[in-house]
Amino acid sequence: MTMHGPTSDLPILLENVGFSAGASHILHDVSLAIPSGGPTVVIGPNGSGKTTLLRILSGLLVATRGCIAWGTRDAVPERLAIVFQRPTMLRRSAAANLRYALRAAHIPRAAHAKRTAELLALVGLEAFGERPARRLSGGEQQRLALARALARDPTVLLLDEPTASLDPAATKSVEEVIRAVAARGIKVVMTTHDLGAARRLAADVVMLHRGRVLATGPSPVFFSTPPNADVATFLAGNLLL
C-alpha cells in the first residue's frame, strides 16, 4: 500500500455552496476549508445535510450554487473514493470483490494477487478472502467496503456514517482501519451521528444544522470548549430545534 505525502488535492475549499431539490433547500451557503492531516469529521442532527455535503464532495451531486476548489484545481480529483453507510456487496467472494475493484481502477492484473492480499490484511480480513462477501457480518462488510475503496489508492476517502448500526466490537474494528488509513497519509472526511466516534477519530470537526455550518474547529478544543450555545446543547445530548 502507498504512503501518501502532501497532495495537490488539498485543502478542499467550499465557498457559499448550496444545494436545493425542488423547493427544498438542503444546504445553505456552506463555506469551509477542509485541511490536510488527520480525519475531518462532520457531525450534526439527522437531516442537517451531512450526507448531501459528502455526495457533493464526491461529485455524485452537483451544487446548485457556490464553488469548490480541490487544492489547485476545481474538479473532483480522480483519486477520490467514497464508502456509503450500507455498501453493496457483489455476489462473489471477498477477494473477488477486491479484484473487481482493482480492475475498475485499472491496476495491472499482475499486481492483483499481491494488492488483494495487502488490502485484506489492512482491514483484518485475511482469513476471509474466499468467503462469500454477502455472508460476512455487517462490520466485516464495512471493512471490505473500505478495502474496495482503497483499491484505487485514493488521496481522499469520504466515509458516510461508517459505523452506523454496528455493535461495539465491529465499530472498534472499523475505527482501527480508519486510523490506519489516515496514518498512511490519506485524507479522511467522514460523517457520523456518533459523538464518541467523532471524539476518538477527528483531528478537526465540522458541525452542520439545518444545512448550515454551525461551527468548525480542532477536535480537542471543539469538544472541551464548545464554540457556541447550540454546539454545547448538541454535545450535551439535547435536541436542537
Image (cartoon, rainbow, N blue to C red):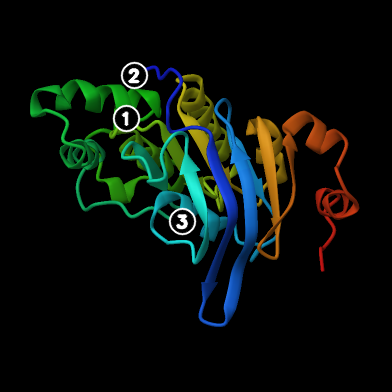
Q: In terms of depth relative to the viewer, which is nearer, 240 or 167?
A: 240
Between the residue at mark 3 and the residue at mark 2, the CA separation in whole angstroms equals 25 Å
Mark 3 Cα shell of 10 Å, populated few (<14), some (14-19), many (≥20): some
* Residue at 67% from the left image edge and 34% from the top image edge: 204
- Expressed as whole percent of the image width and height from the top left, the position of residue 60 reads 38, 58
- Expressed as whole percent of the image width and height from the top left, the position of residue 143 reads 41, 38
Query: Which image quadrant is residue 142 in?
Result: top left
The relative height of residue 102 versus residue 163 in the rendered view (above or below) is above
In the rendered image, which residue does mark 2 sit on?
2
* Residue at 55% from the left image edge and 33% from the top image edge: 175
Quadrant position of the C terminus in the picture: bottom right
User: Which of the numbered marks, if any, corresponds to residue 153?
Assistant: 1
**Is residue 85 toward the left or the right of residue 115 in the image?**
right
**Is residue 35 toward the left or the right of residue 129 in the image?**
right
Q: Are marks 1 and 2 in contact (CB under 8 Å)?
A: yes
Secondary structure under tag 2 reads loop
Sequence-first disc among 3 and 1: 3
